[in-house]
């Protein structure tokens, strides 16, 4: 029996680089695992390196196939502790190997030459846990491949959607351009219809109301002063007047500036008095583009007669002119 004969098998197994597996105690709790850099929680399974005594998570020890400390002299073998089913088998195999070794020979008997003995590989019975450890790297590779394929599928789908949107919007934009060209080409043929349906021009309403108040003030002044020249300056060439002549109950319509001025000239020769538009103000004037309507009331101060009169106006050649005068017939 050589020098190893009779030694305890558990003691022989302790001499190998098998990690010590057990739940973390109070002293090991809170330490940082050198593999994953996360803290070790109390009661969690840990693996302790037999060479440098570094404390790892049990799963981290398995994933790294041993100790993760750089420069560690040990060769950790991931596996269960000596108290598990694998521990006694491993210890027995080591003990048996040492029993089969040839006896030691004194150094002087070799005469400078040493016999060599072929070392047999250590045979350990496979267990379910060792098979699970061997398949763990393959599962990690498969999971990585699945994640990569999923990311590639998402990127391809996003690219396909972007390409479809760009292709759909491209022909639509191209089809709109000829439609605009055709509309512009057909516009001269439908000029009359477009003029009838055209929106009223945008005007400054407040400025238009102030200008119209000035025009109607001139009308009232001309009626008070019997000034046909001033009256003609605020009338449009195509002006019309509907109402009864002074002293008559018959309503008539006069068309054109000359005909309307003739009616007022006859009225001026029959009566005198101050003429006022009693409710003339910008708020009483409704402006619609280059058209306006002013429903007002007049007052002959001397004759003490009142009545309603409505003025229609239009903005022509940069100035507002009266286009229609409608007086209520008594």
Image (cartoon, rainbow, N blue to C red):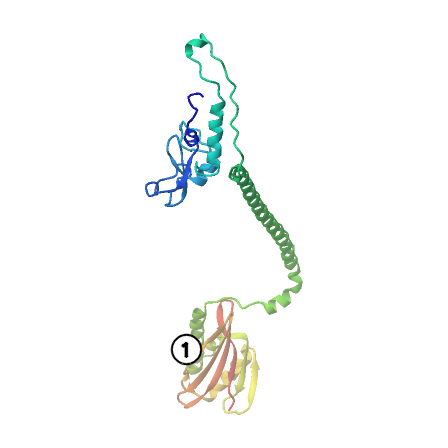
Residue 145 location, x and y as percent?
56, 41
Image quadrant of residue 26? top left
- Crowding near the residue tagged with mark 1, few <14, some 14–19, many ≥20 C-alpha atoms within 10 Å: some
Residue most extreme to the left: 27
Mark 1 falls on what kind of element?
Answer: loop
On screen, residue 66 above or below 233? above
- The N terminus is located in which quarter? top left
Q: Nearer the viewer, residue 5 or 318?
A: 5
Can residue 78 be seen in the rendering of this structure? no
Side of 236 where 206 appears, left or right? left
On screen, residue 259 above or below 164? below
At 44% from the left and 72% from the top, the residue drawn is 209
At 50% from the left and 23% from the top, the residue drawn is 100
On screen, residue 137 above or below 122? below
Residue 305 location, x and y as percent?
43, 90
Tag 1 residue? 281
Q: Nearer the viewer, residue 317 or 141?
A: 141
Residue 85 location, x and y as percent?
48, 38
Q: Nearer the viewer, residue 89 or 291?
A: 89
């Amino acid at each position: 029996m050589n020098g190893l004969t009779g030694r305890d098998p558990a003691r022989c197994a302790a001499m190998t680089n098998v990690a010590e597996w057990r739940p973390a105690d109070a002293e090991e709790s809170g330490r940082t695992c050198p593999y994953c850099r996360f803290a070790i929680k109390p009661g969690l399974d840990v693996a302790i390196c037999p060479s440098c005594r570094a404390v790892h998570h049990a799963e981290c020890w398995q994933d790294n196939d041993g100790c993760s400390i750089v420069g560690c002299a040990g060769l950790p073998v991931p596996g269960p502790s000596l108290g598990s089913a694998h521990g006694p088998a491993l210890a027995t195999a080591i003990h048996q190997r040492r029993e089969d070794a040839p006896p030691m020979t004194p150094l002087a008997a070799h005469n400078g030459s040493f016999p060599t003995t072929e070392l047999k590989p250590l045979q350990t019975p496979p267990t379910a846990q060792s098979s699970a450890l061997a398949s763990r790297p393959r599962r990690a590779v498969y999971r990585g491949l699945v994640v990569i394929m999923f990311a590639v599928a998402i990127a391809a789908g996003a690219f396909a959607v972007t390409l479809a949107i760009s292709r759909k919007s491209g022909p639509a934009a191209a089809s709109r351009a000829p439609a605009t060209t055709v509309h512009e080409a057909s516009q001269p043929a439908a000029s009359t219809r477009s003029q009838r349906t055209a929106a009223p021009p945008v005007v400054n309403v407040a400025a238009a109301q102030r200008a119209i108040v000035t025009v109607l003030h001139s009308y009232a002044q001309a009626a008070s002063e019997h000034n046909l020249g001033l009256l003609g300056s605020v009338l449009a060439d195509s002006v019309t007047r509907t109402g009864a002549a002074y002293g008559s109950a018959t309503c008539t319509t006069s068309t054109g500036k000359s005909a309307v001025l003739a009616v007022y000239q006859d009225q001026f020769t029959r009566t005198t008095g101050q003429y006022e538009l009693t409710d003339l103000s910008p708020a009483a004037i409704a402006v619609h583009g280059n058209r306006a309507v002013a429903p007002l009331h007049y007052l002959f101060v001397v004759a003490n007669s009142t009545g309603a009169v409505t003025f229609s106006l239009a903005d022509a050649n940069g100035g507002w002119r009266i286009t229609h005068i409608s007086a209520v017939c008594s």
